[in-house]
Amino acid sequence: MGAYIVTGLKGQEHVTSADDGAFNAGIVGTGKYVMKTAEQFAAEIVSNNIVRIKSGDLVNQGRHIRIEVNDYEDMTIENGAQSVKRNDLIVMRYKKDTSTTIELESAELVVIKGTAGATATDPTYTSGDILAGATQDDFPLYRVSLNGLNIEKVTPLFSTVPNLNELNTKLTTFINDMQVGKWVNITPIDGYLVEGSCIQMGKIVFCNFFVKLKQTGTILKLEHNWRMVTGFPVPNGFMLVSGVHSRQSGADGLSVIIPATINSDGNLVTYYPQTNEVYLTSTSGVSFTFAYVCK
């Protein structure tokens, strides 16, 4: 048929479900997703024979299927049997009837009964490519696990897709986190003067600081593996995954990479593994370049 316009006036009915489906798939994705509307097809165990599926919207390869707000559908689960287990699947079944001239399409919730046994396995279901013209496709929503006569649990099998507002919020947060010049405050260390800065770029924090003594006329010889709290906190909403620092000293010029830890106050703790004698005074000290990854 070649190219044709969909959203345009042609003087006749010309927009098909395939047109809308292809457009939806281009925006939402070509997979199977539950949307964050209504009750997101929440499941409720009413009895050992009834699982209630509540309102929601889903998109299956571009086809929009829904249960309206304040509505629900009760799915009948056949009786279990003593001393055996069974998995049933609750699926949203798409069908297209190619025997009709206009190829009617439909959707319904269906329970696919599994086989009982000492261990439970999921029953098979139909997976079709709707965008390529498949006549049936099952979208598994829940696994109903029976242990003996009882429904043991109902496990969701679907993924949700974020709406545009959520995506915009996440994108804005990401962009803000990536801005060069977002500094993390440095906490003063008792007895020491810390000069430096800390910048967060996404999930990586870079620190550069110099440590010396506050009090004039005092001197401190650094012992091997001298520990210090850097004063650099892990940013709010993040947790330390891994951290290393490289150290440069004016005394011995050595640069090494050393693991870092985090204390109970949420600050990073590092140490100085000097090989030569190094002293801290009010005018000379030790410089650190530090980076750590958060999630």
Image (cartoon, grey):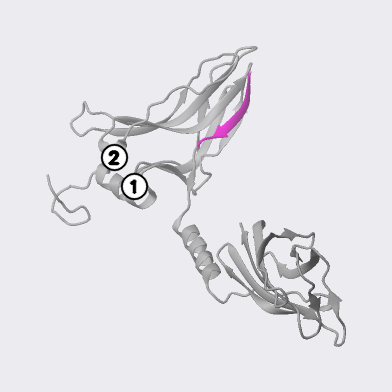
Q: Residue at x 78, y 67 (%)?
A: 229
94 inside magenta stretch: no
* Number of numbered discs: 2
Q: Earlier in the sequence, mark 2 or mark 1?
A: 1
Q: Give the image quarter of residue 223.
A: bottom right
Q: CA distance from mark 2 to mark 1?
A: 9 Å
Image position of 22 (left or right of 120): left
Which residue is nearer to you in this view: 177 or 41?
177
Which residue is nearer to you in this view: 107 or 88?
88
Question: What residue type is disc 1 on?
Answer: Ala
Q: Quadrant of the C terminus?
A: bottom right
Specify few, some or many for label 2: CA neighbours under 10 Å numbering under 14, 14-19, or 20 or more. some
Spot occupied by residue 241 in the image (x, y as percentages of width and height): 65, 55
Q: Main secondary structure of the magenta part?
A: strand
Spot occupied by residue 256 in the image (x, y as percentages of width and height): 66, 64
Q: Which mark is residue 25?
A: 1
Q: Are marks 2 and 1 in contact (CB under 8 Å)?
A: yes
Question: What residue type is disc 2 on?
Answer: Leu
Q: Which mark is residue 131?
A: 2
Q: Residue at x 59, y 34 (%)?
A: 44
Q: Residue at x 15, y 51 (%)?
A: 4
Q: Which residues are magenta?
A: 150-157
Spot occupied by residue 99 in the image (x, y as percentages of width and height): 21, 26
Q: Give the image quarter of residue 120.
A: top right
> Could one spot residue 232 in this view of the protein?
yes
Image position of 18 (left or right of 150): left
Q: Is residue 236 above or below residue 79?
A: below
